[in-house]
Image (cartoon, coloured by chain):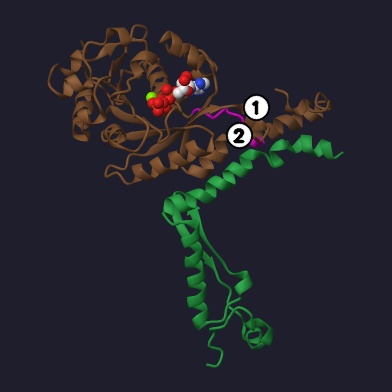
Amino acid sequence: MVQARLRQTASRVITITSGKGGVGKTTVTANLSAALARLGKRVVCIDADIGLRNLDLILGVEDRIVNHIVDVVEGRCQLAQALIRHRAYPELYILPAAQNRDKTAVSPAQMIRIADELRLQFDFILIDSPAGIERGFKNAVAPADEVLIVTNPEVSAVRDADRIIGMIELLEKRPPSRLIINRVKAEMVKRGEMLSAEDVTDILSIELIGVVPEDETVLIAGNRGMPELNSRSGHAFMEIARRLLGENVPHTYHNASQGFFKRLTRLFTGSGTRQGSVFDE
Amino acid sequence: MSSFWERLLGRRNQVGSSSVAKQRLQLVLVSDRSELSPEIIQRMKDEIIAVISKYVPIAHDKVEINLEQRQRDNWLVADIPLLRNTQRNAPVQSSAESSTPEDA
Ligand SMILES: Nc1ncnc2c1ncn2[C@@H]1O[C@H](COP(=O)(O)OP(=O)(O)OP(=O)(O)O)[C@@H](O)[C@H]1O
Ligand SMILES: [Mg+2]
């Protein structure tokens, strides 16, 4: 059971969405939830992808689901009876989606009610949005104080992200959106064959909160059902969590000018005269 | 020697597919955000030029009308240089302006 407690600051409802499917919303929700919990915050994540639930699997709680969000909405159980506590992160809870229902089983107003009830117990309420711009997306963004837009450095994902940002700007509440660029391959960016973080931020004109590298650990962690924060992608998620908490964490991803100066110093320290060597990392 | 500068400046300054991607995205987002197709945008530009040149002679070859993104807002930005008196009277200017009321 979740105990009521006094909190110093207001809780924050953050929706993770993208437009295009498969860009990493569930991955971001799971890892960011774990990262915030590791930083001592009380976190609950809601799987709003009704009919295609996955967050439970990625967080490794799929075998402990008793009730789900539709049971709560339809009054078959109390909200607290549907929350599952994570084994490795005692500050992290999961509210699973229903697997055998569709998105219309929950309304935006009901999502707001659930989020408001969770505000009493938690510092952070993270909502994993389904792909698309339909009902499931509308449910997921209805209670949001803030939105994190996940995209990949790839033309169709960026275009869909732009569409979603435009739709969020039209919401009555107008929650601020920030950008997470996922699956960046630094080596391809260097070759000029992948949009860089600056390119994508420039095109979408919204604030960047983090860049997550392509990392096979994500898949391995998914296999195990346990987020891995001590990895390259895990460090990126820890940084995003700290930025969410208001810390000024400088971005450390590869960028053109940084690379330029690195190359420059390498050239003049004599190690860069070999053909192609200035590109080696 | 050229490879020295290439290496110094990095290959990103050459044309990789990412710069093509960026350009194409910037163009398609102008249409997406304004909900105007490239065709409609072109027609609108032509009509704007036609209307203005009904009143004042303009330097058609230097006209620039573009939909631009400033932060996340759309701006219709037009640079439409007007012809000076001396240029107006020069006979070479007549090419594109069939409807200019020069007789006024
Ligand atoms: N940084 C990363 N590095 C490598 N693989 C990743 C990364 N992020 C996500 N993936 C992989 O991409 C796939 C899709 O990720 P995920 O399920 O998080 O996307 P999603 O946006 O939630 O998808 P959907 O729209 O279907 O809900 C998964 O197989 C995941 O392992
Ligand atoms: Mg998902």
Q: Residue at x 78, y 34 (%)?
A: B7
What amino acid type is highlighted by mark number 2?
Met
Tell which of B73 and A271 is nearer to you. B73
The chain to which mark 1 is attached is A
Q: Which residue is mark 2?
A: A194
- Residue A206 as seen in the image, left or right of residue A129: right
Q: Which chain is green?
A: B
Tell me the number on the disc at residue A187.
Answer: 1
Taking the magenta stretch, the answer to whether it contains residue A215 is: no
Q: Residue A259 location, x and y as percent?
A: 67, 32
Disc 1/disc 2 C-alpha distance (Å): 9 Å
Q: Residue at x 58, y 36 (%)?
A: A195
Taking the magenta stretch, the answer to whether it contains residue A252 is: yes
Q: Residue B62 location, x and y as percent?
A: 62, 70
Q: Residue at x 18, y 13 (%)?
A: A81
Residue lying furthest left in this view?
Answer: A75
